[in-house]
Amino acid sequence: MPLQPRQLGTYFALIEAVNLFQHAVEQQLRADGDLSDIQFQLLMRLIGANGQLTMTELADSVVYSRSGLTYQAGQLEKAGLVTRAPDPRDDRATLVTITDAGRARIDQVLPGHVDVAQRLLFAQLTDDDVDALGEIMTRIRDHLRAEPPRSAAPRKSAPRKRNPE
Amino acid sequence: MPLQPRQLGTYFALIEAVNLFQHAVEQQLRADGDLSDIQFQLLMRLIGANGQLTMTELADSVVYSRSGLTYQAGQLEKAGLVTRAPDPRDDRATLVTITDAGRARIDQVLPGHVDVAQRLLFAQLTDDDVDALGEIMTRIRDHLRAEPPRSAAPRKSAPRKRNPE
DNA sequence: TATTGTTATACTCTATAACTATA
DNA sequence: TATAGTTATAGAGTATAACAATA
């Protein structure tokens, strides 16, 4: 069943709004605190978890490959914003901990970030809109979290790899 | 004024839902037609414009730097999905035109894409939700389009460049 | 055996500035 | 002078597979 016309309009508006908003956020984070979008999300996630998480937990929370996270954690560590140390409860795991400098960096970026979110997003919404949007996005997020990673993709035609080696 | 608690919940749900959805879309486009998210958007935009646009128009419609678009247009041209030719109305401009192969590629990817949108997004929404979301996102998009590119960013503290040269 | 994390590698993408050509 | 587009270049980010260590 194809998308209905009203769904199509909603879909395109959503895509473009998200594009524009993400672009604005990246500018702000870079300008105010020299952070990428992902680095900001990683630090925020650590704060939300009382300051520390394992690499796997952190990767899962931002929808990221583990090798990609190793790279980003390296960048954050180099910048002094996090530390990495062995997890006493599991010798395989690495605990990532946000530093005071990391918290300070978030303090430095957050006002501008909140300002962008206020101006570009919430200024356009009534309280009822906020409630409706929150309810809708929570539902979508929970469903997406529950989805099997990729099994459901029908893979209609293209074989995507020519050199299986 | 900081974000209100209800805004905060809405905000985090929105961010995470978008992360997850974008990830799923990238998988699907790559698997079904070996296209990146941006390449798909560029081709869709061309189709929506009767098949051709100038480089600048195309860049603007996807929030993209022009040099970045030159790269992507080169990729699409190499793959035979678009052609580039001088614009008869302005000798400075380049007209990008989608080819039959480009349209065929979209035909190849679109069913899977619609399917993902249906399953991950719209299956969670009532008709009223679709209307509400469309209305909200249209409002936000229009406001973002009208925003001055970056002038408003307060730029609180960090100087962001140390080698102005 | 399965899981955690890192490394090496190769590739894709993006941004900047310098440049050409036309308006 | 301003605009359209390309190029060169350099850097950031990402994914894959192979690997070591622990559960």
Image: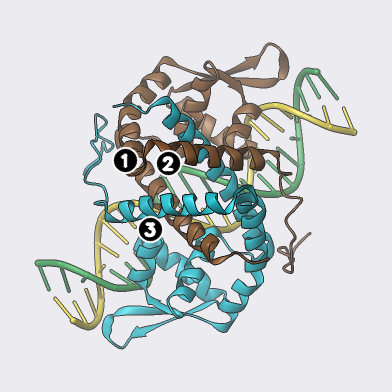
Chain colours: A brown, B cyan, C yellow, D green
Query: For this rendering, which residue is in front, A70 or D7?
Result: A70
Q: Which residue is mark 1?
A: A123
Badge 2 marks a residue whose secondary structure is helix
Query: Mark 2 or 3, which is nearer the eye?
Result: 2
Give the image location of residue C3, x and y in percent.
77, 29
Badge 2, how many Cα within 10 Å: few under 14, some, many 20+?
some
Query: For this rendering, which residue is in front, A94 or B43?
Result: B43
In the image, taking residue A66 as reference, residue A82 lies left or right, namely left
In the image, taking residue B57 as reference, residue B25 lies left or right, namely right
**Which quarter of the rendering shows the C terminus of chain A?**
bottom right
Q: Residue at x 44, y 23 (%)?
A: A81
Q: Residue B164: which quarter of the image?
A: top left
The circle on residue A147 is: none
Work out which residue is located at the far top of the displayed protein and give it. Answer: A88
Q: Which residue is mark 3?
A: B63
**Vertically, is C9 above or below B52?**
above
Q: Which residue is mark 2?
A: A129
At label 1, the amino acid type is Ala
Q: Residue at x 30, y 32 (%)?
A: A112
Badge 3 marks a residue whose secondary structure is loop
| Precedes in sequence: disc 1 or disc 2 | 1
Q: Residue at x 55, y 19 (%)?
A: A49
**Vertically, is A10 above or below C23?**
above
User: Can residue A63 be seen in the rendering of this structure?
Assistant: no
User: Can residue B116 be seen in the rendering of this structure?
Assistant: yes
Q: Chain of mark 2?
A: A
Badge 1 marks a residue whose secondary structure is helix
Q: Residue at x 26, y 36 (%)?
A: B162
